[in-house]
Image: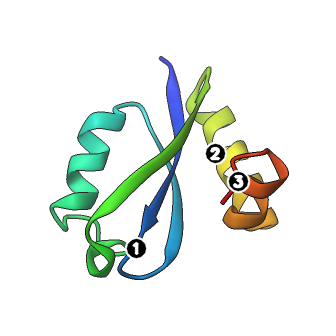
Amino acid sequence: MEYVVYILYSKKKLRYYVGQTHNIKGRLVRHNYGFVPSTKSGLPWVLITTFDVENRSEAMKLEKKIKKRGIKRFLNDNQFGV
């Protein structure tokens, strides 16, 4: 099963969020309807980018790498120009 690591941005909170899922459309809906406690206060969330990975294990590794580096710094390092 293919997984996706995704980065969201909230203009309201001026912050980024990184997560991983196997259903990006459904996950984005859950974030924007306030069903995810950690992102509820930042509605609406905008999808910045996604990274396709082979499985959940790889998704978790990439998510951890992004969080460790810092989401904004990771985006800048990878030429997403934030």
Report x, y in % for residue 68: 78, 65
The image's mark for residue 60 is: 2
Report x, y in % for residue 43: 26, 71
Q: In the rendered view, does 68 fall on the left or right side of 40?
A: right
Residue at figure coordinates x 69%, y 47% from the top left: 80
Residue lying farthest to the left in this orientation: 33
Q: CA distance from mark 3 to mark 2?
A: 24 Å
Residue type at tag 2: Met
Q: Nearer the viewer, mark 1 or mark 2?
A: 1
- Count of marks placed on residues: 3
Q: Determine the image quadrant of residue 66.
A: bottom right
Mark 3 = which residue?
81
Q: Judge whether 43 appears above or below 28 on screen.
A: below
Residue type at tag 1: Lys
For marks 3 and 2, the one nearer the N-term is 2
Residue at figure coordinates x 19%, y 68% from the top left: 34
Residue at figure coordinates x 80%, y 45% from the top left: 78
Residue type at tag 3: Gly
Residue at figure coordinates x 69%, y 65% from the top left: 72
Q: Nearer the viewer, mark 3 or mark 2?
A: 3
Observer-nearest of 14 and 25: 14
Query: Neighbour class for label 3 at 10 Å: few (<14), some, many (≥20)?
Result: few
Residue lying farthest to the front in this orientation: 81
Q: CA distance from mark 1 to mark 3?
A: 16 Å
For marks 1 and 3, the one nearer the N-term is 1
Q: Determine the image quadrant of residue 24.
A: top left
Mark 1 = which residue?
11
Report x, y in % for residue 55: 59, 25
